[in-house]
Every structure is written in C-alpha cells, then in structure tokens.
Image: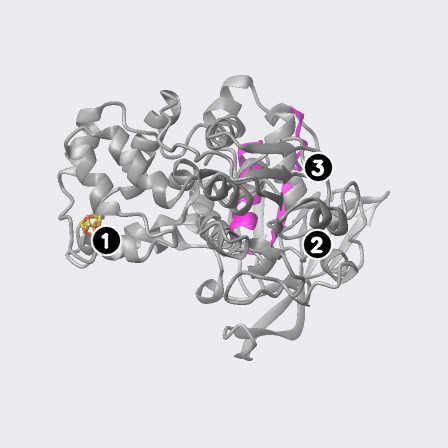
C-alpha cells in the first residue's frame, strides 16, 4: 500500500473530473424543460430558496427566449446564481419543493435552467446592474467568499466604495477552494468572481488576513463600517492516538490541493478511510476514488437517518464505489515507520437525542480494524475562536453572535455567513451578505 500521485492518465483524470451535471446544449432543449413549469402561484420552489429567486418568472423568461431578463431575475436575488446552480443541494431546496414531486413526476430541473441563463450572461459579459455614482462612503469586508461578495455587490450598486480583504490569492471562498472539482471547476469560480466584480466600485486586496496583516482597529478607523464574512476556520481534529502519522490529512486541505495543484499532483492512498458524512466528507471520498484510490471507506458514528449530507450526495459516493460503515467512530490510527497502516474504530449504537436533536452515538466497547494507508478527516470545521476572542467579539464557541440587524457587539462591525452560522450552504451565505449590506446601508444612512 502506498500514497502516490499521478495514478491515472490525462484522459482518465479528465473523464473522472468531468462536469457531473452537463449543461443544456441548445435553447430548444432548455425551452422544452421550461415549458413544463406550471408557473405556480405562491411558488414553493421560490419559498424554499434562501435567496427567494423568482423561479417561475425566470423560467417563463426562458420560454420566451428572454435569457437576459431571466439572468437579471436570478442575479437580482442571488448574484452567485451561476455557481449556486452547480453546487446547491437543490434536491432539498427548490427542486425538492417543486409541485411535480407531489404528482410523482420528475421535478422541473430548476438548477439546470438557472445555469443556462446565468452562464449565458457570464459568457456574453452582460452588465445587468448599474452602480449608482459614489456616495463617498467606504465599507471594508473581510472575506471574498459568497457572503462577502454578495454584500459587496449589493453595497456597490448603491454607490458605496467597497474594499474586500481576502486571505487567499483568489476570491470565491468555499466555492473556489472547498467543493469537489467535478461539481464546479476552479476556472468557472474565477470567472464568476470577475463577473461579480465587473460592476465596479469593489477593490479586492488578496493575501490579507485579519489578525495577521490587517487588524479590526485599522479597518474600523479607515472605513464607515466593517462586514466580517471570513467563513469558518480550521478542520476539527479527531483527538485520537496516531493522528500525526504520515497519511492522516484534513479533507479541507485535500480538496484545496485538488483545486489548486491539479489532479496528477495530488497524492492518494490505495485504501482510504474518510471520517464523517457531511458534504465535505462526500467531496473528499468521491475525489479520492476519482484520483485512483482502490478502496474508499466512509466512517460515520451515526446512521443514515442522522447524516448531514443529502441522499443525492450519498448516491454519488456509492456510484463512485465508496463504501460506508455506519455506527463506527475512529478510536486510533496505527502506523509503522511513521506511516498509517490501520484505523481502529469503535462500534457505536444510538442513544438519546443530543443538543442537535439527533440521537447521540454511544460507544458499545467493541472495536474493529481497517487496513488503510490514508485517513481523511472530515469531521467538521472549528470557528475562528482565538481570532474573535482576541477582538472581544461576542461569540458562541467561536461563532460570531449578531443581532437582528446583522450587527456584532462592536459598533459599526457587522457579520454574516459561515462565520456566524458555523457552516451552511453557499446560497445561505449569499443571503447573509445581502442582509448584511441592507443593515450597513441603514447604519450609514444611505437608505
Ligand atoms: Fe415551476 Fe415546479 Fe416552481 Fe411550480 S414548483 S413554479 S412547477 S418549478
């Protein structure tokens, strides 16, 4: 067993990482699906979208070939509508709410239609929003992820001059660095960021990290308001023996490497264990398989009923040939010569519900072992606890606490997205950015 890179041919990498949801090839194909929409009154698809995109309206616009209008409808509610059409768990949002499900018929492919209109807008660089003349107010945003970009775009439309401080060398946050490459390519993410910024009035300063190269005091001094949208922090550790052995890696880092280094450069084991059952765990497991791992086993301490990924996501992993062991928790990583050789797991059973409302896993005292050469940890992320405490920001275990106006306990400092909720969907962060911008506009009395 060995952890090596360059396991496949170029053609194999391309096939394994090809777009999982191919787009429409023609307007005719898009119109055929659009014409199936019933244009429901009080549409449940719109209600289930965190950004409240007017779904029947944008689909109707496709039927009349008003693609520019359709894109405008989408972007008015969600400026990351293009990316969201590729990464949203639509089976539990708009498409899951489509009335066709009640008729036991195939839901309208809302995401695919949304992708059609928004990609046309990006390809043609249609400028659908005009920035008002500058009103002479300046806002600093920390983080160029979905919350920060959405906040910046909303503010810029109103003539606010925005400066975003981003710790990475590219914008997009989780979209650019933390999602499986077969769902959305790094290149697409770059194009989406450029498209959002093309409204003007937004400067992005890359490689700038709060607490390191910039301070909150400095931002407060130089700007009329500050919005914190820096996402969640580092990967949660397992705190088990053997965690430092060579071959134990963080899922976030693994996915980041795939997106930034190129597929052949990323090493993967022959036999891989992935700890966790959230979306990040699925993205790590499927991509380990697609990089050429022979066996990938997902380890989850609860059951299918409690998993945080969707059934659709689990199906992708199963179709890729990943195995799942339910009711198992990592206990120890065993190694030889400093390298991973085995993962010892405790067999769990379900007890009483915990704080999350899900039945808590309880150790039965029994164990089993898996021969593996790589362990990928995807047990969630820990918020930037040290950072928020350093700035005396109200928080709950590192998650920022805000009031109904998105304001933190520090005057003029607002926050939203994963930094507040601990990690939800991209579309939730986009809405948080809009809410934050609205609150800031009211605070600096622009609206
Ligand atoms: Fe169209 Fe389905 Fe939405 Fe009704 S629920 S408006 S059919 S997409």
State if disc 1 and disc 3 touch (CB < 8 Å): no
Kindly identify which numbered label has been placed on residue 1.
3
User: Where residue 121 sits: x, y (%)?
Assistant: 35, 27
Mark toward the start of the polypeptide (1 vs 2) = 1
Q: Nearer the viewer, mark 1 or mark 2?
A: 1
Query: Is 286 displayed left or right of 40 in the figure?
Result: right
Q: Which residue was labeled with disc 2?
A: 343
Whether residue 399 is visible, yes or no, is: yes
Q: Secondary structure at mark 3?
A: loop
User: Where residue 60 sits: x, y (%)?
Assistant: 17, 39
At a point 75% along the width and 56% down the height, the residue shown is 387
Q: As rendered, which of 442 and 380 lies closer to the eye?
A: 442
Viewport quadrant of the N terminus: top right
Q: What is the distance, in whole Å, between disc 2 and disc 3 at their CAs?
A: 14 Å
At a point 13% along the width and 48% down the height, the residue shown is 38
Q: Which residue was labeled with disc 1?
A: 98
**Rendering quarter of residue 73:** top left
């Amino acid at each position: 067993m060995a952890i090596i890179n360059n396991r496949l041919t170029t053609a194999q990498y391309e096939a394994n990482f090809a777009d999982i949801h191919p787009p429409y090839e023609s307007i005719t194909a898009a119109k055929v699906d659009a014409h199936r929409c019933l244009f429901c009154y009080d549409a449940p698809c719109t209600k289930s979208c965190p950004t409240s995109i007017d779904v029947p309206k944008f689909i109707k616009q496709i039927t009349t070939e008003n693609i520019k209008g359709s894109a405008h409808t989408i972007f008015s509610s969600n400026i990351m509508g293009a990316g969201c059409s590729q990464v949203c768990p639509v089976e539990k949002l708009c498409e899951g709410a489509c009335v066709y499900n009640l008729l036991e018929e195939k839901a309208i492919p809302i995401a695919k239609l949304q992708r059609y209109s928004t990609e046309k807008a990006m390809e043609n660089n249609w400028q659908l929003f005009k920035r008002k003349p500058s009103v002479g107010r300046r806002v600093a945003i920390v983080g160029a992820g979905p919350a920060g970009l959405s906040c910046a775009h909303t503010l810029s439309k109103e003539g606010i001059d925005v400066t975003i401080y981003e710790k990475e060398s590219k914008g997009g946050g989780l979209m650019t660095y933390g999602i499986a490459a077969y769902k959305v390519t790094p290149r697409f993410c770059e194009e989406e960021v450029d498209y959002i910024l093309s409204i003007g009035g937004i400067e992005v300063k890359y490689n700038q990290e709060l607490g390191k190269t910039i301070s909150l005091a400095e931002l407060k001094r130089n700007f009329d308001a500050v919005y914190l949208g820096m996402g969640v922090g580092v990967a949660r550790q397992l705190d088990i023996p053997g965690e430092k052995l060579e071959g134990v890696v963080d899922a976030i880092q693994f996915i980041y490497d795939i997106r930034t280094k190129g597929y052949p450069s990323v090493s993967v084991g022959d036999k891989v264990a992935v700890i966790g059952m959230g979306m990040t765990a699925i993205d790590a497991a499927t991509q380990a398989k697609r990089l050429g791992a022979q066996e990938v086993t997902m380890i989850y301490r609860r059951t299918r009923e409690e998993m945080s990924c969707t059934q659709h996501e689990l199906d992708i992993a199963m179709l890729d040939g990943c195995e799942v062991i339910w009711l198992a928790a990592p206990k120890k990583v065993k190694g030889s010569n400093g390298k991973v050789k085995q993962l010892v797991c405790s067999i769990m059973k379900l007890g009483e519900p915990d704080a999350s409302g899900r039945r808590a896993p309880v150790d039965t005292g029994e164990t089993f072992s898996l021969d593996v050469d790589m362990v990928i940890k995807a047990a969630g992320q820990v918020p930037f606890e040290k950072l928020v405490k350093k700035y005396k920001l109200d928080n709950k275990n590192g998650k920022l606490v805000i009031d109904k106006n998105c304001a933190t306990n520090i005057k003029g400092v607002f926050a939203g997205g994963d930094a507040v909720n601990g990690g939800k969907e991209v579309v939730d962060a986009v809405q948080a950015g809009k809410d934050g911008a609205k609150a800031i506009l009211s605070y600096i009395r622009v609206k």
